[in-house]
Image (tube, helix red, strand yellow):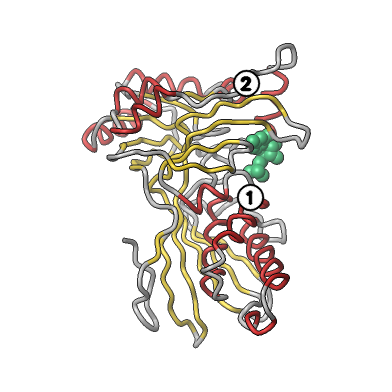
Amino acid sequence: MVVAMSEVNGRQRVSVQVPGKINLQLSVGPRRDDGYHELVTVFQAVSLYDVVHVQPASAWSVSVGGPQGHGVPLDDSNIAMRAAQSLAERAVKFLEPGARSLIGPVSIEIEKQIPVAAGMAGGSADAAATLVACAHLWGLEAAREDLEVVAGELGADVPFLLHGGTAVGTGRGDDITPVLAQGEAHWVLWISVGEGLSTPAVYAAFDQLHEQAEPSMPELSPELVAALRTMDPVAMGLALHNNLAPASLSLQPALQDVLDAGRDLGALGALISGSGPTVAFLVGSQAGALDLSMGLAARGPGGDIVRVTGPVPGAHVIDSGGPGSRMVNH
Ligand code: C5P
């Protein structure tokens, strides 16, 4: 994430940039008593970003724009709004009265490039960005642990987006351990322009597919961990794994054509990201990414095709450019 501060109408405004994620490994295990599934996942933050602006206001509000802004709820169910309000509640509960003076309603403006309901944690990214922005605005930067607690309560992917980089998620996916990953991976993303997939619906389809035989406890792939150490694209491509994919494919069978198209065009690896429908293709270089994206655009199936790299930082603070400054991406 990138943070900058500026003054708008005399009021401090904080802008935070947050990446989307893909899952290089998603191994879903048995359903737990709390309804979540035990999982082992390897997240990578990639260079497709939302920007969230937060500014003190007389009432709580949220607005959304940008190429992927459609379909985001603007009521109290908006996860960015819930993030801001949850952090305010927690801070008011735990802070000394003198330290609470800055905490109050904010207006939240989201510029969305990360698709919604696409397996890239677009909503969770906005929640993480809002937490970081509000923490700056309210002088809570030191309370990193509180941010992590609130993040975990908001959703299983939110803690990773505070961290970024490449990391293993265990438990519900919210227990984060960074992974040693040196170098840069080049990805081509195929992003659906049609219906998204609801994450709970995909997990419900997974349960149905496993009605007869409970899935085993998930384990981290040693092949993937070894490949990540040097970001060896050939070894990484072979180690990519998502056992939620059959459930996503049962709801959107046409995704198989997307996977096949990328493989036929020479991708080193291809998988559905998270619950989908975004498909991530691994290639060996920037030139390879250009070739594959042109091939996919020519061959179809139709979708938005975006070239990204990973890993990128999840939380990255820059200096403010002074009053009236605009956010700068470093
Ligand atoms: O935590 P979050 O709201 O992002 O999760 C969305 C849904 O995904 C959950 O309601 C649940 O159906 C499913 N899920 C799961 N097990 C996980 C993570 C998510 O079943 N570990």
Q: Which image quadrant shows ligand 1?
A: top right
Secondary element type, mark 2:
helix
Q: Residue 4 location in percent, x, y? A: 41, 71
Q: Residue at x 53, y 23 (%)?
A: 254
89 sits left or right of 111 in the view: right
CA gap, disc 1 to disc 2? Answer: 29 Å
Secondary element type, mark 1:
helix
Can I make out residue 296 in this image? yes
Q: Which residue is mark 1?
A: 152
Q: Residue 199 location in percent, x, y? A: 64, 36
Say if 75 sits above or below 44 in the image. Answer: below
Q: Residue at x 61, y 54 (%)?
A: 151
Q: In the image, which disc is placed on residue 18? A: none
Query: Extreme bottom residue here?
Result: 10
Q: Residue 298 location in percent, x, y? A: 33, 29
Q: Quadrant of residue 217?
A: top right
Query: Extreme right residue here?
Result: 33
37 sits left or right of 9 in the view: right
Between 168 and 47, the residue placed more toward the observer is 168
- Amino acid type of disc 1? Gly
Q: Quadrant of residue 219?
A: top right
Q: In the image, which disc is placed on residue 250? A: 2
Can I make out residue 199 in this image? no
- Amino acid type of disc 2? Ser
Q: Residue at x 52, y 64 (%)?
A: 132
Say if 119 sits above or below 213 in the image. Answer: below
